[in-house]
Image (cartoon, rainbow, N blue to C red):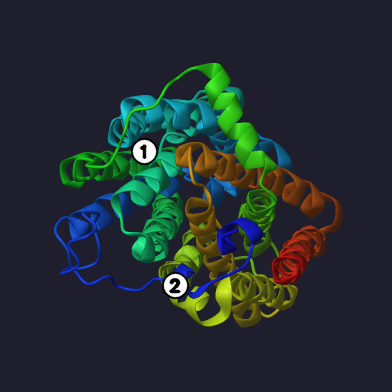
Amino acid sequence: MSPASTGASTAMDAATTVPVSDTSDSRMAPGGPGYRRMSFALFLAGVATFALLYSTQALLPLISDGFGVSASDASWTVAAATGGLALFVIPMSALSERFGRRTVMTASLAVAVTVGLLVPFAPSLGVLVVLRGIQGAALAGLPASAQAYLAEEVRPRALVTAIGLFVAGNSVGGMSGRVITGWVAQEWGWRVAVGVIGVIAVGCAVAFRLLLPAPRHFRAGSLHPRRLLGTVRDHLANPLLRRLYAIGALFMTVFGGVYTVIGYRLTEAPFSLPQGIVGSIFLVYLVGTVSASTAGRLVGRLGRRGALYLGGGTTAAGLLLSLSDSLPLVLLGLVLITAGFFAGHAVASSAVSKTATHGRAQASAIYQSAYYIGSSTGSTVGALAFHASGWSGTVGVALLAIAGVVALTVLGSVAARRQVVATAH
């Protein structure tokens, strides 16, 4: 049985450059034809996805004031988008198996950016939440299709790096969306701010479609519901994949809760920061860009489980630091939370792509569904905990999630050791 099927980490998880002179594999590799165009195109797709998906997150205090609602009510503008993505990611992955990864990603971005241009005109919180749900459902065609595209078009030893670059695009999109909306909203209000994000996403979508190379290794599959359900059942029956899905959900519970609530904390005493400064706090996403893009090297040195332990430990340390009333320590805590989250997410998501031997789009889709269920849960539960117990309540929820990540990783280590013993006997 392969290491991937037992949960064992190997050096093959490392992101190493495959020599272009190796002509035995026609898939793309760093330095080879089309690799840079592909990387930049998917980077832009990641930017657009996260910029749109979380366009209201940094604006929640202004949305609360504008509609006269509580933090937990306003948080539904985030939870609806991530929940829509979680609900539709598996059906959209099935469409990508039939009609192609590039086609589905292009259509998804087109619908999402169109809705993004309508969001600023929402007359009520209810309409805004509905539009955000539609936008999240449209964006569901991006994450799983992108990972399946990479698994098919990129050589295996370069896969972690390629997926890390896509995740890095997520972090840049999340950062730029929040920073831009923060400063724009301070001058012209939240409606203009989300409109600006919509226009930026249009540019990313057009560039993505022009740059992404046509797939060369895609083979159309069937849309038969029974076959789709069978593939999903196969993936859920794999213990390693189940652990990876749960780890992704738990990491995102932390991230969704922290970044949904942090704006409220920083605009209140003892910090009382203006909206533009609060938006700039999200520049710490640059740390996530670095940690995601270097995930391959982490796996090469520590193994997959070692990298997950490091990501979880770094996140937990950041959560504890963020309890301080010192702004520099809170910012350092956010840096550690962001670095740990993006590293853990890149490692877990790339492991799913490497582990699945068939139905890769569905395997990635289940991961993305779990991941964004975690985001919706974190946004809602984190806001409720903040309302009930302040920032310490949000941190308590996040630390429980990190404890779950560690426990699942330990289970993976135990399963791998048992497999080694069984093989030896």
Q: Position of residue 339 (x, y in %)?
A: 54, 71
Left or right side of 184 for 209: left
Quadrant where the C terminus lies? bottom right
User: What residue lies at 77% left-to-right and 68% top-to-bottom?
Assistant: 414
Question: Would residue 87 be seen by someone viewing this image from the given angle?
Answer: no
Quadrant where the N terminus lies? bottom right
- The amino acid type, in three-letter code, at marker 1 is Gly
Figure check: 117 above or below 393: above
Question: Badge 1 is on which residue?
Answer: 195
Of all residues, the one furthest to the right in this rendering is 388
Neighbours of disc 2 within 10 Å: few (<14), some (14-19), many (20+): many
User: What residue lies at 21% left-to-right and 39% top-to-bottom?
Assistant: 209
User: What residue lies at 67% left-to-right and 73% top-to-bottom?
Assistant: 309
Question: Badge 2 is on which residue?
Answer: 14
Q: CA distance from mark 2 to mark 1?
A: 40 Å
- The amino acid type, in three-letter code, at marker 2 is Ala
Of all residues, the one furthest to the front in this rendering is 425
Left or right side of 178 for 157: left
Figure check: 300 above or below 55: below
Q: Position of residue 141 (x, y in %)?
A: 42, 34
Pointer 2 or 1: first along the chain: 2
Foreground label between 2 and 1: 2
